[in-house]
Structure formats: C-alpha cells, structure tokens
Amino acid sequence: MTAAEPLPPIDKIVLPRLHDLGDGFTVRRALPTTERRMVGPFVFLDAMGPVDFAPGRGIDVRPHPHIGLSTLTFLHQGEIRHRDSTGAVEVIRPGAVNWMTAGRGIVHSERTPEGTRTRGDRVAGLQLWLALPRSHEETDPTFTHVEAAALPVLEGDGARATLVAGSAFGKASPVPVFSDLVQLDVVLEAGARFRLPADFSERAIWPSTGEIVIEGDETVHAPDRLILLRPGAEIVVRAVTPARFALLGGEPFPERRFLYWNFVSSSKERIEAAKEDWRAGRFDGVPGETEFIPLPPDPPGVVWKG
C-alpha cells in the first residue's frame, strides 16, 4: 500500500456467539467479545430472532437486576412487555424504543404479552446496552418509551434511516442518552447507497437482513456479523439485495468498564457490592412479580470482562 492509497474501511469482523435466554429463546451476542469490548459507549449487542412462537408460548425473561448502564430495545417484529422496579409497564412494538436507565440499580422483566402469547408471535430485533459515563453511573433509575413516529427519519434514493438514539445529520433522537453517540436503523433497496455519519471515532455495522458491501472493500456481507469500521474512514454502504442494518457509534470513555452478568461499572468493587445486594434481596422488586433470576456462580478462570 502506497502513501496515496486510502486505508481499508473495515477494521475487523466479529462473529457472534449463541446465548440461550431460556425456554429455547436463543440470541446472537456480538458485544462484548475478545476482539472488541465496546464501541463507543455500547458494551453489549444481542440480536433476537426472527423466532416463531407457537400459540401459548413466548418470551419469559424473569426479573433480573442491572447497574451502571442504559438498555435500548428496538424490535423489527413482534411484541415484548417490559416491567420494572420503577413501576413502568410498557409493550414495545416494531419501530419504537424502550430505553431503561439502571443507574444505581433497577430490576426488570421481559415477557410476551398475554394476548400475543395466545395467538403466537414472531420476534426479531436488537437489544443494546450502553455504559453510563462515570458521572452518571449512580443516577436514579428511569424508564422512557418513545413511539416510532417520534423518531427522526432521513429518506430518499432508496434509503430510509431512522435515528433511534443520539444525533446525526443535524437531527437528535428524543431518547434521553447520557453521552454523545449515534444509533441508526437503515433500510436500503437493492442498489441503494448510504453514506454513514463520520462524527464518531468508533463505529460498527450490524446487518440484520439482505447483503451489503462497504465501498472500498467490496466483500459481500451477509447478516449476523459485527463490522467494525476503521476510525476516520469515509464509509458508504451499498445494498446488493434489499437490506437492513444498524449503525452504532460514539467516543470511548476515558476509564475502563467492567462487565459481570448484568452489571456494568468503572469499579470492580461496585460490581461486587451489586452482586451481594442481589443475593441479599436488597434491590427493589418488580410490582406484581415474585420470580427472579438468581445470581450465577462465578465462572472458573477469568471473571472480569472489560
């Protein structure tokens, strides 16, 4: 490569691992991995489905705790009912955003609503975790639901980009984020091109459906891989077939983040305290629910991730 040649646009490809959430509901987890722990503030990416539930069956993620993060749930298909220890109850549907900030501690459950369970459902979408800045790690827990119609949309030339969270192209999502970031949901017709915002040093693409190429590389990318982009590169995505992908990006925090089970923190000691609080039943519960997920045992070998 000569000095005049541009750097390749792709830094690394991360293949997800399968993770069973129970009752046969399996997700594909692309963050964190040994290749990359975070992308900006994004510390966790689970891709759900599409999975078909027969009538009478559905998702049943029992109450469990979080600290030090916000969760972002964005569905492409299906319905999930959220309940948490602040008293919030909300059914999320495709195109809307459930944004839960754990801060000093929250407990929530995720289940298929009763009526939907009766008739059966197909579920697909993403759940992302975003680490909180150190100054907000102990903020009060909150929950916000944003309907699809409230999200900014950029549309034209065969592309439709929804600004799910953060800011891009001079617009800002109403989702109440705590750091500078971007999360886009982009749908492309075959042959359409989309230039990514270059506002952030760390960016990644998660293709959900169809096939895409990153101009300057020309490898055809199928769904279910996290494409880590080279900092500073100009990125244009072209759809080989009708396609959909998520963009996530932001700036890295100055401090390391540690991840243990559902807890994220800049302090190992804070995570140990949260573990003990969950064992001892000191977290607030989810109104109307008595089930809970026990704290898992410490795995052998490396415990701390981050």
Image: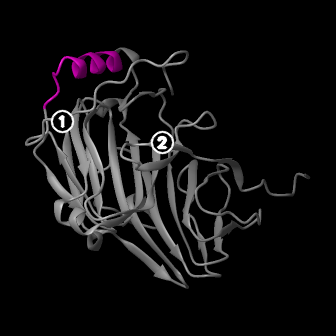
- Residue 126 visible: yes
Q: Amino acid at mark 2?
A: His
Q: Element under label 1? A: loop
**Prevailing secondary structure class for the magenta stretch in the rendered image:** helix
**Position of 180 compared to 111: left or right?**
right
Identify whether 36 is placed above or below 276: below
Q: At 25% from the left edge and 60% from the top edge, which residue is drawn?
A: 56
Q: Which contiguous range is marked in magenta?
A: 270-284
User: What is the spatial separation of the Cα atoms under label 2 and label 1, in whole angstroms?
Assistant: 21 Å
Classify mark 1: residues with Cα within 10 Å, few (<14), some (14-19) or many (20+): few
Q: What residue sits right under mark 2 in the picture? A: 19
Q: Position of residue 267 (x, y in %)?
A: 39, 19
Which residue in the structure is indicated by mark 1? 291
The reply, left or right, for residue 26 in relation to residue 16 is: left
- Answer above or below: position of 274 versus 75: above
Three-letter amino acid code at the position of disc 1: Glu
Q: Mark 2 near mark 1, Cβ–Cβ under 8 Å? A: no
In magenta stretch: residue 189: no
For the residue carrying disc 2, how many other residues have a C-alpha within 10 Å: few (<14), some (14-19), or many (20+)? Answer: few
